Amino acid sequence: MDNTGKGNGPRLWISYPWISREERDFGYLVSQLKDAHIEATYDSLQLLPDRHLWERAVQRLLSVGMDGWLYILTHQCFTRRACTDELTAAINRAVQHMGPGFPMVGLLYDIASQQVPPMLRVRPCISLADPNWKQQIADVLKCHTPMTPGGIMKGEPLFSWRVHPNYSGNPSLTAVEVRSKEDSIQYWRFAIPKSARAVAWGQGSSGGREISPIRFSEATGSARYANHEVTWFGAANIISRTESAYAVFCGPLPDFICFGPARNPFGPPGRMEIFWTALSGKMV
């Protein structure tokens, strides 16, 4: 099934991957998203043994200049390993061809976010049962970074990211270091999933050095990114090319870590760069 809208809104490809057609036809989502000024195209895709999902996904995304990809997640994605593997491979290939800033969202149908496998939770997951699901999708599409025809993001990331395992000689600690590539930043913020916790954070010399015990104008708060509840924190110790911000974690890193400037000493972060820890450190 292929329904293509015409208009000036962002173009979204909706795919429903399935092995046995146990669910419904999701073509009705096209008209519902039109109310949110999103022009959508819907494809129901049976997973075939002789053709990979990623081949069809990349071809579809590149052929008509889509601005985002919405894949529907049902119980099949978790009870059938082949479905999970095919979708994960398709997402990874889409990152390679479309760039790490290309919006990709899972739409949960009759499942809870806790049921989503970790490899699929690194991307935003939005529940169809949420009354604000259309606005959440629109918000994700607004973050689309323009790309060249070859899939290269226009403009380099603003920050340099480094991961330091065995931080300070402790094998249980991993530090994420962020420094500015250009201008210095007076007020800076990290944001991480609310379920995660940084055991230490602050500013220090670049290169995996010690964190200063002094934090000026320390600020913390909470917010929402797509369907993720996040905690943000930061200070006013200047970040530059030689001075970095550090967040230290005990055990596995959170699925994603955000970093960006704030406008005032105690305010929330503005636009942030996202470090996807499970996708080889891809930045958005």
Image (tube, helix red, strand yellow):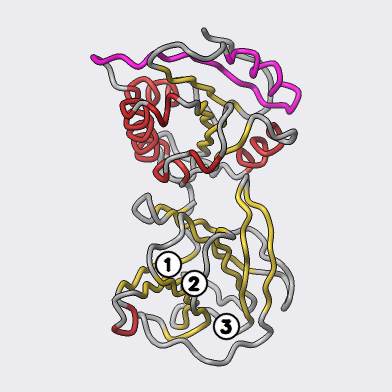
Q: CA distance from mark 3 to mark 1?
A: 15 Å
What is the x, y in percent for residue 27? 60, 13
Query: Of callouts 3 and 1, which one flags the residue occurring earlier in the amino acid sequence?
Result: 1
Query: Of callouts 2 and 3, which one flags the residue occurring earlier in the amino acid sequence?
Result: 2
Vertical order, 276 against 1 (above or below): below
| Residue drawn at the location 47% of the way across and 39% of the way down | 116
Vertical order, 49 against 100 (above or below): above
> Which residue, given by chain and number where applicable, does mark 3 sit on?
238
Image quadrant of residue 230? bottom right
Tell me which segment is drawn in magenta. 26-50
Was residue 138 drawn as part of the magenta stretch in this picture? Answer: no
Q: CA distance from mark 2 to mark 3?
A: 10 Å
Would you say the residues marked 1 and 2 are in contact, meaning their CB atoms lie under 8 Å apart? yes
Q: Left or right? Give the position of 114 relative to 267.
A: left
Circle 1: is it few (<14), some (14-19), or many (20+) Cα within 10 Å?
some
> Which residue, given by chain and number where applicable, does mark 1 sit on?
160
